[in-house]
């Protein structure tokens, strides 16, 4: 379910890729969760209004962040022991970067509907 929601979030962002501004942090540029994008699709399915889909290893609960041609997201692999930041190409979904940010010896417990990859990436200039 979490993986589906992540793919759904990324897909929604892609449908406005040519008109949309960057979305560099949680809830967007101003932190308000508001976009002025127009003519967004009202429905989507496995085949309708989908630009691309890509499997992401592990579990993630963060919002994607968008800067230029890159979409950044986080994922927790190996039961939360390995935390990654992943950059995808906005046009194709190709993985551009898969960076192990850090490892946790004992990641602790999380709610069953969450993961250790909850923080949304923040993009400031050329830094994530």
Image (tube, rainbow, N blue to C red):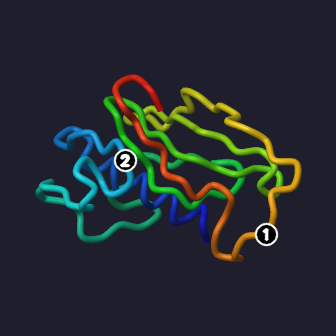
Q: Nearer the viewer, residue 61 or 44?
A: 61
User: How packed is label 1: few (under 14 Cα within 10 Å), some, or many (20 or more)?
Assistant: few
| Residue 74 x, y percent position in the rendering | 58, 47
Q: Nearer the viewer, residue 46 or 79?
A: 79
User: How packed is label 2: few (under 14 Cα within 10 Å), some, or many (20 or more)?
Assistant: many
Asked whether the beta carbons under mark 1 and mark 2 sit within 8 Å of each other, the answer is no
Label 2 sits on residue: 25
| Residue 66 x, y percent position in the rendering | 36, 40
Q: Is residue 47 left or right of residue 19?
A: right
Residue at 66% of width from left, 41% of height from top?
Answer: 84
How many labels, in total?
Answer: 2
| Residue 37 x, y percent position in the rendering | 15, 54
Among the 4 quarters of the image, the one containing residue 97: top right
Residue at 44% of width from left, 34% of height from top?
Answer: 92
Label 1 sits on residue: 109
Mark number, residue 88: none
Residue at far right of view: 105
What kind of element bears circle 2?
Answer: loop
Among the 4 quarters of the image, the one containing residue 79: bottom right
Residue at 60% of width from left, 61% of height from top?
Answer: 3
Please say if 84 is above or below 43: above
| Residue 17 x, y percent position in the rendering | 27, 42
* Cα distance in 3D space between marks 1 and 2: 26 Å
Image quadrant holding the N terminus, namely bottom right
Residue at far bottom of view: 112
Q: Earlier in the sequence, mark 1 or mark 2?
A: 2
What kind of element bears circle 1?
Answer: loop
């Amino acid at each position: 379910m979490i993986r589906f929601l992540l793919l759904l979030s990324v897909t929604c962002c892609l449908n406005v890729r040519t008109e949309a501004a960057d979305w560099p942090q949680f809830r967007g540029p101003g932190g308000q969760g508001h976009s002025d994008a127009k003519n967004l699709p009202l429905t989507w399915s496995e085949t309708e209004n989908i630009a691309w889909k890509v499997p992401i290893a592990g579990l993630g609960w963060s919002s994607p962040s968008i800067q230029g041609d890159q979409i950044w997201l986080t994922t927790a692999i190996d039961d939360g022991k390995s935390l990654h930041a992943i950059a995808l190409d906005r046009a194709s979904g190709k993985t551009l970067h898969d960076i192990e940010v850090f490892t946790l010896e004992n990641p602790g417990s999380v709610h069953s509907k969450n993961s250790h990859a909850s923080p949304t990436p923040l993009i400031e200039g050329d830094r994530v």
